[in-house]
Image (spheres, helix red, strand yellow):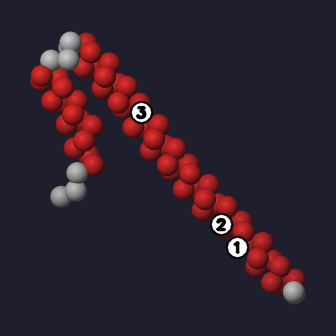
């Protein structure tokens, strides 16, 4: 195995690790954002005593960004 092949293998492994790190960080950010949004919406809706209107707006806030057009 030549020095170039070793370097190429090393760079591939670094690239693979960086891609995996970016993927896991993106998943973690998405999960934390969803959790924070849910907790905030529950706190807001709780302040309105879980009225029908507040539940409607909370559901809209939770689920409308995920719809595809």
Badge 3 density bin: few <14, some 14–19, many ≥20, Cα 10 Å: few
Residue drawn 54% across the image and 56% down it: 23
Marks 2 and 1, how far apart at CA? 6 Å
Looking at the rendered structure, the secondary structure element under dot 1 is helix
Circle on res. 12: 1
Marks 3 and 1, how far apart at CA? 35 Å
The answer to whether residue 48 is above or below residue 66 is above
Marks 3 and 2, how far apart at CA? 29 Å
Q: Report the quarter where the N terminus lies.
A: bottom right
The answer to whether residue 28 is above or below residue 58 is below
Q: Residue furthest left?
A: 53
Where, by quadrant of the figure, is residue 17 drawn? bottom right
Circle on res. 35: 3
Q: Report the quarter where the C terminus lies.
A: bottom left
Residue 10, horizontal then vertical, whole percent = 78, 72
Circle on res. 16: 2
Residue 55, horizontal then vertical, whole percent = 18, 26
Where, by quadrant of the figure, is residue 37 drawn? top left
């Amino acid at each position: 195995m030549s020095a170039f092949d070793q370097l190429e293998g090393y760079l591939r492994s670094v690239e693979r690790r960086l891609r995996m790190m970016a993927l896991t960080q993106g998943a973690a950010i998405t999960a934390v954002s969803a959790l924070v949004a849910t907790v905030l919406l529950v706190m807001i809706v709780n302040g309105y005593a879980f009225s029908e209107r507040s539940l409607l707006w909370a559901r809209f806030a939770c689920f409308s960004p995920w719809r595809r057009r």
